[in-house]
Image (tube, rainbow, N blue to C red):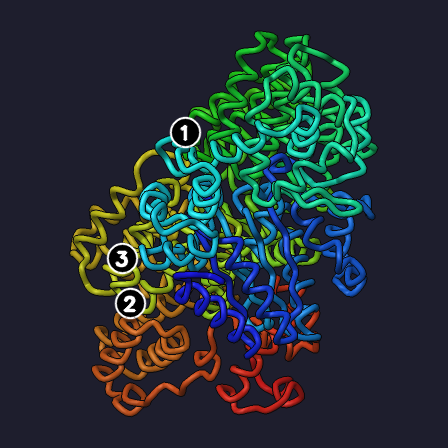
């Protein structure tokens, strides 16, 4: 009987009922030890089984908290026969987890996607309830995988419940429920069940503070010994009660319990094998079983409550714990199990043990369990006698911690590594890790300088890589001196790099030499792998080669989808979304950003969300949504200031607040190489327009000349068109407008084209050439309306009315049916219209098949269709 749990039981039943009805959900039960979380899970499992739900269950085990995927193996072992139905990258990721595959998994979130797909597939046969007890003791790899699945479940008939203590398991975004302490009435009824006489209940109720486990244990103890006194805190009282029970057992039974507690997983054969070394056997567990401290089956030993195992372990002296872990390590057939016990059995440096831990770390990293691998390298470093090798292993631990998303831990490990050595070669090898941590934590300038300081001539290949990375960090940090230094030192190493050389020339305002080098870098080494493609994309963005940048960004997104590189996808989607805005595909950009934000949140990459805000901020500026634009731009981090300031100045320009726009743009155009990038240079054109609108052509001259030099050196049609527009604004010559319009006709950046046509139409109207003005103004209005650029469209309508075309200006804009769809619905219907099956769409978007079909079900009536066949006939561009 569960007393005082009506609210909690109702919440669990509602979660299960909702799943049975077709909508997934997740709930976290959070509370102190003994508050009744496990009992609630037991009741939920019993109720779910009675309704035909499949129940999967896993319990976190404290000794396994650092064992890669230990929890996931426990959860998925009964359903491993379903792996073959998963997309192959996902199936391979889970085979690696279960030890039946050897493919290296690069992305730590691919396993979570595989869990999501597997649970969704299981739910095809009926609703599923997934119960996770003692989640605070899950290894990080398991916790990440389960949380990823929990956050992305939607329409799959899956319910997930995590039970956890107050500390140790964070699950932002999931609903939490905290079981309450029992009131006096419920506590008295529970003690009556325990058999405690009424005269003793009041004192036990006071001591137990409404904790059900404490009520049961204290009540039983006081029933057997009415004079017994217990310590102050509830947790200490419960542990003390268990220690007292264990202390009354025979010595050999206490040792057998210690073996069970140290082993942790309940593996009876392994415990008995280790026990033989220590002189204990299965018969020594009988007294503990009779005392109801453990439950023993043919193959398992389970403590009635995890705190009993804690009491058995903490109550033993250190020497005995060391002996038990050594016996378990010697008895283990699984090398990862052996590696778990070895550090606990080793108190002095031992290179042989350290080597075993490094091997275990490699296996963990191959399964993308980077946090576990980092800990193993750290443990190996502690046991490594040679300081140089110790520094290497700490450096490896730092790199793996960074891969696991633990930047602060990575920084600490890198610092420890540096303190272990003063050898330049070792310090050079550590520098990329330390710099990556610094960059991730927002110190881009120091990250760049560290790389430049640590370059070693002993390894030219590593040195060139460090200089290239340092130059890129310096570029984003606005550190022109470091960009120049990196270029010079690359030349000294015989590895002049066109991208770095190009950035260095831009830092010197030498566009004529810098942009051609960057354009060369765009096409250099097309088969050079991921790094070469990333450098080509960066170079294409710098020079404003929108078409190539779009192609490369789309290819990177496709690669991430195909290989299940979930952690890398938000950055790729971000770059793609920026290009989509420039191409006028605002809804596509919103869909890309929406997906990137969801994945960033689901994978714990929350700092990425602030970066992503720059894209919708610019869309909001174009569309005239002031509140949204200012909110999103205000959330941009310092390193993303260019995007935020550019969006705000564009908004102010559209509102006619030219002084505010010009002041903002002039402040943003300060020193630093970032001001030479395509995005920043496009804002320079806005600076010219704001100055001219204020009647201050002198403030427009300098920016106009800078943009003109940049545009002519790069020879991009859109840039040259905007350069001619700037000249026309300052000089008032029609020929510049005519050239600008002709260059825009070559394609690219429709918003800039419409702005040029609007300005030219205004110039023509003022010149009393109303008929000519109407033609370009109609074109501008059509583009502005298509882009939902409301303030700009209104300006075009005003000009058209002044030019004598009231009919066109008053015409309502036809609604685009795609605007009825949510960003995710838009992605799904486009993929469906292209002939992709629901399973193929799910694999690409990291969703379940049922969620994909849910989005299609919602999208069909919005589009006025009823099937995929009808969908394929629509124009969805």
Q: Secondary structure at mark 1?
A: loop
Residue 479 disc label: 1
Which tag is nearer the camera, tag 3 or tag 1?
A: 3
Which callout, 2 or 1, points at the residue further toward the start of the chain? Answer: 1
Inter-mark Cα distance, 3 to 2: 9 Å
Task: List the residue tagged with mark 2.
Answer: 625
Q: Secondary structure at mark 3?
A: helix
Q: Is residue 477 above or below residue 181?
A: above
Is any part of residue 568 visible from this angle? yes
Q: Is residue 82 above or below residue 510?
A: below
> Could you tell whether 58 is left or right of 299 in the image?
left
Front residue of this view, candidates 125 and 858: 125
Q: Is residue 842 above or below residue 501?
A: below
Residue drawn at point x = 77 percent, y = 26 percent: 280
Report x, y in % for residue 740: 41, 63
Crowding at mark 1 (Cα within 10 Å: few <14, some 14-19, many 20+): many
Report x, y in % for residue 125: 71, 75
């Amino acid at each position: 009987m569960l007393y005082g749990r009506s609210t909690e039981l109702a919440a669990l039943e509602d979660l299960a009922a909702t799943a049975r009805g077709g909508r997934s959900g997740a709930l976290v039960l959070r509370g102190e030890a003994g508050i009744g979380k496990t009992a609630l899970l037991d009741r939920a499992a019993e109720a779910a089984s009675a309704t035909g739900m499949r129940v999967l269950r896993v319990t976190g085990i404290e000794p396994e908290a650092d064992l890669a995927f230990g929890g996931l193996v426990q959860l998925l072992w009964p359903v491993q026969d379903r792996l073959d139905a998963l997309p192959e990258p996902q199936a391979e990721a889970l085979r690696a987890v279960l030890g039946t595959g050897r493919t290296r998994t690069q992305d730590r979130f691919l396993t979570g996607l595989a869990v999501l797909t597997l649970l969704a597939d299981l739910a095809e046969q009926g609703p599923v309830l997934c119960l996770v007890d003692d989640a605070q003791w899950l290894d990080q790899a398991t916790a990440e995988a389960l949380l990823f699945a929990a956050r992305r479940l939607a329409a799959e008939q899956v319910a997930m419940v995590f039970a956890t203590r107050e500390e140790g398991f964070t699950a932002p975004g999931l609903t939490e429920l905290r079981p309450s302490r029992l009131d006096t009435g419920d506590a008295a009824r529970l003690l009556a069940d325990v058999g405690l006489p009424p005269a003793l209940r009041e004192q036990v109720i006071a001591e137990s503070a409404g904790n059900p486990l404490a009520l049961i244990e204290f009540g039983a103890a006081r029933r057997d010994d009415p004079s017994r006194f217990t310590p102050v805190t509830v947790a200490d009282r419960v542990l003390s009660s268990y220690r007292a029970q264990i202390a009354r057992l025979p010595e050999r039974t206490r040792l057998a319990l210690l073996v069970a507690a140290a082993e942790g997983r309940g593996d009876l054969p392994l415990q008995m094998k280790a026990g033989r070394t220590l002189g204990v056997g299965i018969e020594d567990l009988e007294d503990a079983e009779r005392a109801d401290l453990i439950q023993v089956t043919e193959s398992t030993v389970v403590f009635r409550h995890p705190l009993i195992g804690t009491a058995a372990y903490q109550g033993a002296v250190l020497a005995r714990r060391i002996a038990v872990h050594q016996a378990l390590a010697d008895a283990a057939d699984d090398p990862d199990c052996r590696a778990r016990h070895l550090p606990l059995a080793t108190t002095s440096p031992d290179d042989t043990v350290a080597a075993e831990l490094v091997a275990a770390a490699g296996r963990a990293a191959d399964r993308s369990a980077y946090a576990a691998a980092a800990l193993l390298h750290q443990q190996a470093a502690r046991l490594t006698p040679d300081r140089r090798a110790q520094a290497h292993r700490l450096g490896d631990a730092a790199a793996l911690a960074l891969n696991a998303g633990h930047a602060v831990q990575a920084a600490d490990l890198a610092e420890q590594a540096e303190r272990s050595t003063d050898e330049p070669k070792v310090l050079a090898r550590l520098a990329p890790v330390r710099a990556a941590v610094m960059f991730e934590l927002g110190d881009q300038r120091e990250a760049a300088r560290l790389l430049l300081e640590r370059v070693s001539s002993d390894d030219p290949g590593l040195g060139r890589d460090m200089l290239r990375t340092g130059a890129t960090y310096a570029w984003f940090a606005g550190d022109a001196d470091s960009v120049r230094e990196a270029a010079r030192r690359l030349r000294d190493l015989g590895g002049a790099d066109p991208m770095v050389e190009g950035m260095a020339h831009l830092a010197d305002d030498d566009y004529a030499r810098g942009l051609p080098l960057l354009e060369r870098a765009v096409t250099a080494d097309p088969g050079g792998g991921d790094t070469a493609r990333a450098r080509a994309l960066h170079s294409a963005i710098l020079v404003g080669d929108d078409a190539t940048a779009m192609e490369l960004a789309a290819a990177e997104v496709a690669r991430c989808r195909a290989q299940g590189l979930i952690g890398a996808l938000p950055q790729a989607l971000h770059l793609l979304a920026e290009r989509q805005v420039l191409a006028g595909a605002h809804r596509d950009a919103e869909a890309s950003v929406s997906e990137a934000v969801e994945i960033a949140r689901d994978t714990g990459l929350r700092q990425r969300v602030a970066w992503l805000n720059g894209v919708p901020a610019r869309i909001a500026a174009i569309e005239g949504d002031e509140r949204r634009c200012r909110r999103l731009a205000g959330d941009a981090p310092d390193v993303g200031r260019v995007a935020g300031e550019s969006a705000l100045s564009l908004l102010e320009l559209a509102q006619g607040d030219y002084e505010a726009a010009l002041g903002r743009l002039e402040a943003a155009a300060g020193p630093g190489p970032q001001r030479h990038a395509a995005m920043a240079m496009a804002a320079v054109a806005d600076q010219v327009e704001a100055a001219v609108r204020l009647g201050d052509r002198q403030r427009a001259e300098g920016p106009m000349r800078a943009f003109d030099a940049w545009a002519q050196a790069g020879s991009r049609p859109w840039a040259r068109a905007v350069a001619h527009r700037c000249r026309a604004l300052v000089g008032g010559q029609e020929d510049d407008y005519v050239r600008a319009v002709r260059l825009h006709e070559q394609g690219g950046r429709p918003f800039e084209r419409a702005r040029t046509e609007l300005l030219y139409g205004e110039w023509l109207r003022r010149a009393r050439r109303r008929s000519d003005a109407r033609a370009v103004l109609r074109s501008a209005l059509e583009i502005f309306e298509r882009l939902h650029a409301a303030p700009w469209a209104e300006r075009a309508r005003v000009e058209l009315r002044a030019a004598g075309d009231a009919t066109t200006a008053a015409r309502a804009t036809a609604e685009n049916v795609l605007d009825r769809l949510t960003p995710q619905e838009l992605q799904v219907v486009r993929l469906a219209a292209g002939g992709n099956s629901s399973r193929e769409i799910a694999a690409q978007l990291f969703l379940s098949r049922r969620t994909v079909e849910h989005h299609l079900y919602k999208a069909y009536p919005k589009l006025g269709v009823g099937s995929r066949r009808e969908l394929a006939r629509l124009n969805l561009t």
